[in-house]
Image (spheres, rainbow, N blue to C red):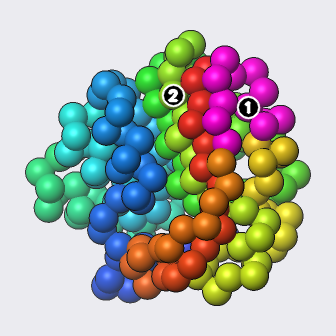
Amino acid sequence: MNNFWDQRYSIKEYAYGEKPNQFVLEELAKLNPGRILFPAEGEGRNAVFAADQGWQVWAFDPSTKGREKALQLAGKHNVEIDYRIATYDNMNYPKNFFDCIVLVFAHMPPHQRDQIHKKLAGLLKPGGHLLLEGFSKEQLSYPSGGPRNYDMLFSEEELKDDFSAFSKLEITKTETYLEEGLFHQGPASVIRVFGIR
């Protein structure tokens, strides 16, 4: 899988653009900056945006090419991000450390999804925020990106179970129009989560 992402990120252009995801842009504006984590952050567009907004930013991804481009983008914006090469299995952050965790199109093997989500939730401080946008299972009907594996796409019920311990959880399935680089273009079916641990 690392080879897939390294290959995708080896092109000159930013595969999903340099601008942040629209949901992240809108939701982060409502929160006070603190410590924030971006798992599976790819080329860094969302992490760099958050750093620009005054957040202390941590990010990880298994792709070395993604990290290289993320650090280039951070340099372009004159911000610093702590970006590590890691997977969900070997990420190493303190529990109850982050004020916010942001998952943007971070799809994972279905047999690991609930365990990974619960592990990430444990890194949030009590009262910390979760922002998630991912493709819904209806995305198979759209050509605008995402896994072509039905089981890797999200359902509202699955995400509700994964984050059932949260004190507040808002889950919305909606149709949107993506204009994110080369690989997210056109109408899409997404699920958005706003949670408070």
Number of marks drawn:
2
Q: Is residue 12 left or right of residue 146?
A: left
State which quadrant residue 119 falls in: top right
Find residue 91 and report its horizontal and vertical position in percent. Answer: 58, 39
State which quadrant residue 148 falls in: bottom right
Of residues 181 and 167, the one nearer the viewer is: 167
Crowding near pointer 2: few (<14 within 10 Å), some, many (20+)? many
The residue pinned by badge 1 equals: 163
Against 94, is 135 above or below? below
Q: Is residue 40 left or right of residue 35?
A: right
Find residue 47 and report its horizontal and vertical position in percent. Answer: 35, 49
Tag 2, which secondary structure?
Answer: strand
Residue at 88% x, 52% y is: 111
**Viewport quadrant of the C terminus:** top right
Name of the residue lying farthest toward the top: 126
Q: Is residue 196 left or right of residue 10?
A: right
Tag 1, which secondary structure?
Answer: loop
Crowding near pointer 1: few (<14 within 10 Å), some, many (20+)? many
The disc label shown at residue 129, or none: 2
Tell me the kind of residue under disc 1.
Phe
**Span colored in magenta:** 160-171
State which quadrant residue 108 falls in: bottom right
Residue at 67% x, 42% y is: 171
| 169 is within the stretch colored magenta | yes
Disc 1/disc 2 C-alpha distance (Å): 12 Å
Residue at 45% x, 52% y is: 23
The disc label shown at residue 100, or none: none
| 71 is within the stretch colored magenta | no
